[in-house]
Amino acid sequence: FFTAPHFTLVVEDTEYLLTFFGLLGVGLTISYLTSLVREQAEAAQSREAQTAALYELGRDLTVTAGLEDVAQSVISHISQTFGREVAIFLPEENGPLKLHSASPGLVIAENELAVADWAFKRGQSAGRGTDTLPDASMRYQPLKTTRGVVGVLAIKPENAGHYLSADQRRTLDAFTNQVAMAIERVRLIEQTHHAEILKITDKLQSALLNAVSHDLRTPLVTITGALSSLADDDAHIDKASRSSLIETARGEADRLNRLVGNLLDMTRLEAGAVQLHRELCDIQDVIGSALEQMDVRLSDRAIHIDAPPELPLVSIDFVLIARVLVNVIDNALKYSPAGSPIEIHAQAAGRYLEVSIADHGSGIQPEDLAHIFDKFYRVQRPDHISGTGLGLSISKGIVEVHGGFMAAENNPSGGATITLALPVQ
């Protein structure tokens, strides 16, 4: 166009043709090199993004504390990195492989589980984009550690004919390694925690057996001694002594009955088998029943009761709440001087009816207040008061089953107050 003849597409000089094709070749070469550089830049950016995603996943997995947190974190990160739907399969304890977590809305057919199971048992990739069961709808990657396969990660392609690139497969392998190590770490933590619980349980069982055997033996020895004296015709026991022995035996029998009742209540509470027989009750009747059950032990105590007659009725299991009051009153008797009064106060407090039992003992040490309702916990005292440490724990469990709560505090004037709050219907 710019050579003779001007303003035409005809070239008279063949040298210009060589120049034209030379420039065309240079242009094509530059274009090719530019596209190659662009592809390399895009690949570098992609690898950088995947490396950053892998770092973010590793950082999140180091702070996760459970399998559910690990699974949700993995699904979120892999979905964002690959733009695909993800599922995680984990084996049940001593059971088959099961779907644990999946991207929202992802539906996995029953026959897909067989592919995941194959990958889990053989430790090899299977499904879409592999040579094994390629007709599956997802690609299944085994989560392998040095201890074996801990699960399977499945990733769904964008469409039927789209597979992961070589770079994506390498990145996915790095992801699965991170996930496998995180799952193994959580499992090891759970196993360690379980072993610690078993160890603590063994100690508690030993402590319980020691405490129970002592507390069972003491009233049995007293009852046996009293009955032996009564049965001895040569003892020449006068009427007053006979009555005293009978009262002693009855008191120890009541104590034994409370201990056995507490053990049974503890078993039912731990098994979640407490069945409430609710009825509308006047709290004054419940307090009266508890005091009647403890009449022998209360013979040298003054009991001050403050329960206004206008208090609302409460829907409770009469027998169980009476047992709670017996346990709390028994605790007050143990930790207060002989002959000192016990005060029982009932009042309406919002949507609860509160019953407080106060003693005039030495109170509860601050370090003991937080544990006073713990199972087997007993306040350390120089006088070594007997007990299993179950009464208040069981009482708290019974009250909570009713929808209430219990609390303990020290009195400004000395002694301690334990309060149970029951919901008013």
Image: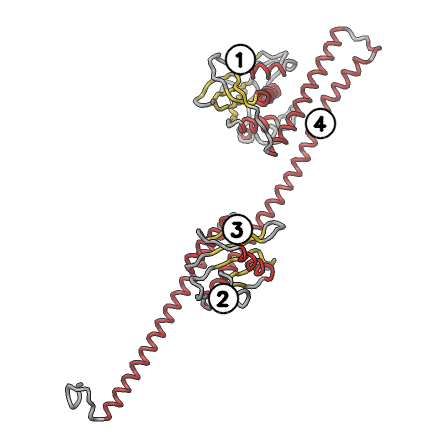
Which mark, by number, is residue 129?
A: 2
Q: Compare marks 4 and 1 and give the one earlier in the sequence.
A: 4
- Residue that mark 3 sits on: 100
Give the CA separation, mark 3 to mark 1.
57 Å
- Residue 156 placed where, x, y %? 46, 60
Residue 195 horizontal side relative to residue 231, left or right? left
Q: Compare marks 3 and 2 and give the one earlier in the sequence.
A: 3
* Frontmost residue, 193 versus 353: 353
Give the CA separation, mark 4 to mark 1.
34 Å
Q: Compare marks 3 and 1 and give the one earlier in the sequence.
A: 3
In the displayed structure, 376 sits above or below 311; it is below
Give the CA separation, mark 3 to mark 4.
49 Å
- Residue that mark 1 sits on: 305
Label 4 CA crowd tier, 10 Å (few <14, some 14–19, many 20+):
some
- Are circles 3 and 4 on residues that touch, CB within 8 Å? no
From the image, state whether disc 3 or disc 2 is nearer to you.
2
* Frontmost residue, 18 versus 51: 18
- Residue 214 placed where, x, y %? 71, 27
